[in-house]
Amino acid sequence: MRSLCVLFLLLCLVPQTLSAFNGKKLVRYKWLSLETPHFQLVTDLPEEDARKLLQELEDFRYFITEIVGVNISDDLAPLPFLAIENRRFYKYVGVPENISGLFSYSSDGYSAIGNVSSFRKGPVSRRRAQHTLLHEYFHFLTFLSVGGVSRDLPGWYIEGMAEYWATFRRDGESVTVGDPTNVNERIYDLYLAVATGESLTDTRNFLKQPIPDISDQSEKAKKALGKYYARAFFVTHYLQSSSSLRRSTTEYVKKVLDGVEYDIAFQQAFGITYKQLDDDIKRYIASGLMAQRVFISSEKKIEFTQVESRVAKLAKSERHLFFAKILWNSTLLDAGITSRINMVREALKHNPENADLAYYLEVLLEAQKIGQAE
């Protein structure tokens, strides 16, 4: 049974204001859809470029599951992934302007959104666009791995691991991870802060800090978010740099999830002070030891394969259904309850037999009623 109470609470928290989400304009465009057993990539990119992006996602999935060893069920429904090149379309979706991607996950489904406006602007820009999608897909892998991964994981670990592994680069039949080029903008913001007196990592406080509120669009909040991601990347990069550090990190996270107090968990897992860790990370960066990891075929042979997909332009009814589900899956999109209701109602007109849409409308109307009563 679907947990209605949780959804009521979430949906009632969404401000009932004029929405930036513009479903009417989004469904007018004839979006391209590429489907495999693992992804439904919906995009405004030309087909050739869309195929390259989908191949990158599939290569990444193969690497993380078959080589790194993250266990994902083959029975999971394909991840709906909206990859937008046109900045105007991206604005219509209602993602906060400083956020390049978003993964949403609830008991009712999951979806991801990524800004790929730089994909066709050259090799370096292409890598940044791919990094955005791989980052969001790594969240999918984190939360949907077999056995279930607690969503109470430390924020720095969730975002740092996604930033780190999204640096994935295929070099023939080998893989390189850890190139900081794709996160240079965030690193620049952090370096500016360090130049004015802030600590580079401040692990004593940073390891306990939750992910900043992405809905806060003040300049101060945007800079704080950028610095958070940069710190998460640096800390994670160092902690992934040796097998002993990786084991200590895993032990630390497990202890935190088991309810051990942060400082005690840190001491038991790492056996050093926070200052020592900060100093080690600084030396790691400053001395040029911030090494990229290279994975080559050894015991586990790396064998990438060309992925075949079903390619089609989404029909009008499919567009309405797709965007209604994207909107349903995320309370972080800038859309009030009325906009969500209207989007689902319109989608139901074009998909009258769809049970999911009927359920969405029922929950939304109840949420609206509760909100009005308050």
Image (tube, rainbow, N blue to C red):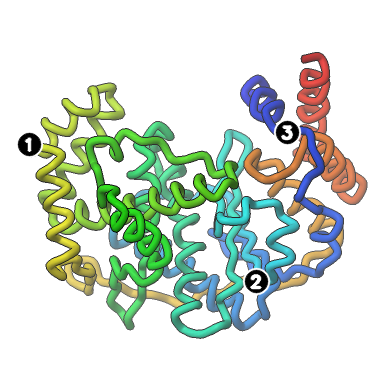
Q: Nearer the viewer, residue 280 or 335?
A: 280
Q: Is residue 111 left or right of residue 133?
A: right
Q: Earlier in the sequence, mark 1 or mark 2?
A: 2
Q: Specify the quadrant that holds the N terminus.
A: top right
Q: For residue 73, say whether it is visible.
A: no
Kind of residue at disc 3: Pro
Q: Nearer the viewer, residue 111 or 146?
A: 111
| Residue ranking furthest to the left | 271
Q: Position of residue 117 (x, y in %)?
A: 61, 72
Q: Disc 1 and disc 2: Cα gap in Å?
A: 47 Å
The crowding category of the residue bearing disc 2, from other C-alpha atoms within 10 Å (few below 14, some 14 to 19, many at least 20), is many
Q: Position of residue 294 (x, y in %)?
A: 22, 71
Height in image: 29 above or below 96?
below
On residue 85, the disc is 2
* Residue that mark 3 sits on: 15
* Residue that mark 1 sits on: 271
Q: Picture quarter containing residue 69?
A: bottom left
Does dot 2 land on a helix, a strand or a loop?
loop
Q: Position of residue 325 (x, y in %)?
A: 72, 46
